[in-house]
Image (cartoon, helix red, strand yellow):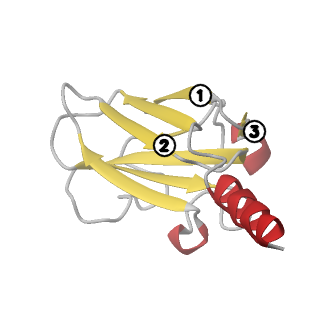
Amino acid sequence: MLNLILSLFLSTILAMNSHQNTQLELIINNGKSDNGLVRVLIFNGSEGFPGDYTKAFKALSTKLENKRAVFNISNLPAGKYAITAYHDEDGDGKMSKNPFGYPTDRFGFSNNPKILFSAPTFEKCLFEIKEGQSHIQVIDLR
């Protein structure tokens, strides 16, 4: 009985720590300046993509250095993700837009998809991180 309890306990601990080696290095290039912050939303599903921060799996922000920002995210569960990023140069926490609704802040998406008249779909920005994998994703703001 004691062996069974110990086995269950160890299995639970291993399951909880199984994604410890999963890493994502996210590099954001082409900020307009070093002012403000780069804001990032990481989605693990299409709901809310690309801009509903309440539906995002993670929301992160950091300062730019030489018009570039780097995020090192560890312990992500294996899965499929899509990322949106923008340079909040004025630091107001919102993406600035012109009167026609087009962003005036620099922005980008994982996989750097071609953007024509609207934001790309979750599927176009999708990438997968497998268990124990290190992944690098570079987003070029435009």
Q: Which residue is mark 2?
A: 74
Q: Residues within 10 Å of mark 3 (few under 14, many from 20)?
A: some
Q: Quadrant of the N terminus?
A: bottom right
The residue at the point 38 percent across, 41 percent down is: 106
Q: Secondary structure at mark 2?
A: strand
Q: Could you say where residue 19 lies in the image, as x and y percent from the top left?
A: 63, 46
Kind of residue at badge 2: Ser
Q: Nearer the viewer, mark 1 or mark 3?
A: 1
Q: Could you say where residue 105 lies in the image, as x and y percent from the top left?
A: 35, 47
Q: Nearer the N terminus, badge 1 or badge 2?
A: 2
Q: Nearer the N terminus, badge 2 or badge 3?
A: 2
Kind of residue at badge 1: His
Q: Which residue is mark 3?
A: 124
The residue at the point 63 percent across, 36 percent down is: 115
The residue nearer to you, when weighing 62 against 131, is 131
The residue at the point 69 percent across, 56 percent down is: 44
Q: Which residue is mark 1?
A: 135
Looking at the image, is 127 positioned above or below residue 6?
above
Asked if residue 6 shows in the view, the reply is yes
Measure how far apart labels 2 and 3 are at the Cα level. Answer: 24 Å
The residue at the point 55 percent across, 29 percent down is: 137
